[in-house]
Structures are given as C-alpha cells and as structure tokens.
Amino acid sequence: MATPQLTKNQTMVMDALSHSEGPLSAYTILDKLRDQGFRAPLQVYRALDKLLEYGLVHRLESLNAFVACTCPHEHEHDHGVTAFTICEGCGQVTEFHDIAIEQRLSALTRAQNFKTEKTTIEIRGHCQSCA
Amino acid sequence: MATPQLTKNQTMVMDALSHSEGPLSAYTILDKLRDQGFRAPLQVYRALDKLLEYGLVHRLESLNAFVACTCPHEHEHDHGVTAFTICEGCGQVTEFHDIAIEQRLSALTRAQNFKTEKTTIEIRGHCQSCA
DNA sequence: TCGCACACGTTATAGCATAACGCAATTGAT
DNA sequence: ATCAATTGCGTTATGCTATAACGTGTGCGA
Ligand SMILES: [Zn+2]
Ligand SMILES: [Zn+2]
Ligand SMILES: [Zn+2]
Ligand SMILES: [Zn+2]
C-alpha cells in the first residue's frame, strides 16, 4: 500500500497520534483537534480509516484505541504480523514483529485451511517500570 | 480458578453461548434472554464477568463478542494462551492453543522485562468453506 | 443479632462507531 | 470544454457497547 500525500484532516490526526505518549481513542483525538476545527467523530474515523489502510496507524482492539506505527522501516510494504505489549500501569505500548511467531501461526492456520487476512496479537500486563 | 455452582443468571447466559453457533454480543444475549426475564445489560455483563473469571467463556476483542470455551479439558486449571481463528464469512470461531507460540511470546516479553497478564491472539480471515 | 459478602434489579449515563444526506474539488476520459 | 466518476469533507442523527450508582434481598459466620 503506497502512501499518498495525506489530506489536511489525515495529517492532523496523524500528528495527534505521533505526538502522543500512548494510544488515543477516536473521541480523545476529536477533543484534541476541536481547536483546529474538528466538530464530529466521523472526521476522525474517516481519517483513521485511511491511516490504517496506509499502515501508518494501528488499532488496538483490546483498548478501542489507536497508535502511530513505530516500525523502523518505511511503510512501502506490508509489515506482516504486528504484536503489541500494553502496560496497564503507564499505558506504554510497544510494537514488535517476530518472524518465528508469524511462521508458527501460518503453519497452524494452513493446517485448518484457514485463509488469514488480519492477525491481532495484544499482550496486556505491566512494563518494567510499573511491575 | 475453581468453578463454583453457577447462579441462575450465569447459567442462562452460559446456555445461550453454549447453544450458539458462533460468538454473541452482550446485547444479543440480552435479546435472547428477554423471554426468560432479563431486562437490562448489566444482568448479562455481570454474568459474563463471572464466566470469564471461571474460564468458561472467552471474550473476542476484535468483535466485542463472547464465545463458550471449547477446550477439551475441564476448567480446573488455567489454560494458558488462547488463540482464535474467526471466519468473516460464516462467523465460525475456532479456539486453539499452541505451546510453541506461548513459549516464543514468553521469551519475547521476558526480554523486555514485561510481566504478561493476558494475551489476546485473534486471526481474522476465511475458513475452508468460505474461502 | 450483627455485619459482611454476594447476587440481583433498575435507572441513568458514558464511551465507541456508523448511517445517510448533501456539497465541493479533482481527475480523466470523450 | 463537458461530463461522469471518485474522493474528501461537513453535519445530523442514530445505534451499539459498557459501566456508574443506588437500593434490595439472602445466606452465613462472628
Ligand atoms: Zn507498525
Ligand atoms: Zn508501565
Ligand atoms: Zn478455552
Ligand atoms: Zn466460514
């Protein structure tokens, strides 16, 4: 998924996520952007849909929230299975990728003839500082 | 977590999930149980909280829905990391457990001194029949 | 008998997400 | 230039998911 030039709304939502310490809900993003003209949830959700499509943002299913992608590589190619640790204490989210996990899941799904489209791996717990 | 005798409400919610083909949202369960006296979401959520605690039910984060546990073994002990394939076509959910995945995730989290409390693995896609 | 824990019932509210409408700007043929 | 299709945007309304807060009743051990 090549990343086209972002629109004004997409840029504002992306900036909000990039500059945030942790994940943000769509409504929290809306509140942050009210000063800049945002008025309705759909403005946020539509921007998020595109950013997710471009791979610039990830959705955390267990939080109903969103984070900017922290992959080191550029977003020119699919980045395979993405996993997250999520600290319940400080809210810190760490994105990681592991080829062994990916291969193992691939073998397991192939065994049941299941065609994978999206894989969610989220690990809730406490980080080193909050343990 | 030993499983005590279930209360009336817990039993009704458990039965609804057990007899369902696929995952059910809390509000869908509520609708199914209105005839049997259920009136409010909290009756469902409170029962679900207990069933989750006892390990009889799993929550699917990516669907905001719940399924009965299909583990073969009895629910006398923790059943480690649980993973699911979820078919977007027919809604079929398959629960599985894999020690290799569990060990690999354990190694990865230990490397960042992260203390895991709950792991979510959900694979969305299409099953053999719906491919 | 008192105090406590627990399940339950009810009303209200909070939080997350999308439907449906219309308008404007862009693009890319014809 | 003109038309049609696509895309983004703004707005209102609605629907789905989850919890707060309050009160009741019951069982059980101190
Ligand atoms: Zn990423
Ligand atoms: Zn932390
Ligand atoms: Zn299970
Ligand atoms: Zn299917």
Image (cartoon, coloured by chain):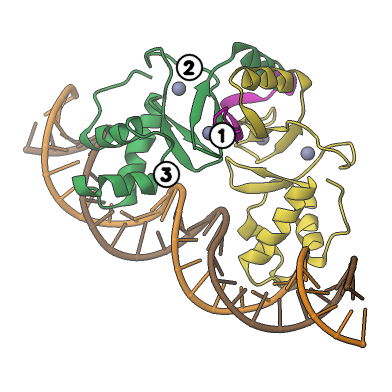
Chain colours: A yellow, B green, C brown, D orange
Report whether mark 1 lies on the same chain as mark 3: yes
Closer to viewer: mark 1 or mark 3: 1
- Using the numbered discs, state the Cα–Cα distance from disc 1 to disc 3 in whole angstroms: 22 Å
The residue that label 3 is drawn on is B25
Lateral position of residue B94 relative to residue A118, left or right: left
Could you tell which of marks 2 and 3 lies nearer the N-terminus?
3
Label 3 SS: loop
Ligand 3 within 8 angstroms of badge 2 C-beta: yes
Label 1 SS: loop
Q: Is residue A71 magenta?
A: no
Segment colored magenta: B110-131
* Residue type, mark 3 in image: Ser
The residue that label 2 is drawn on is B79
Residue situated in front as seen by the camera: B85 or A123: B85
Q: Residue at x 44, y 37 (%)?
A: B23
Q: Is residue A66 above or below residue A108?
A: below
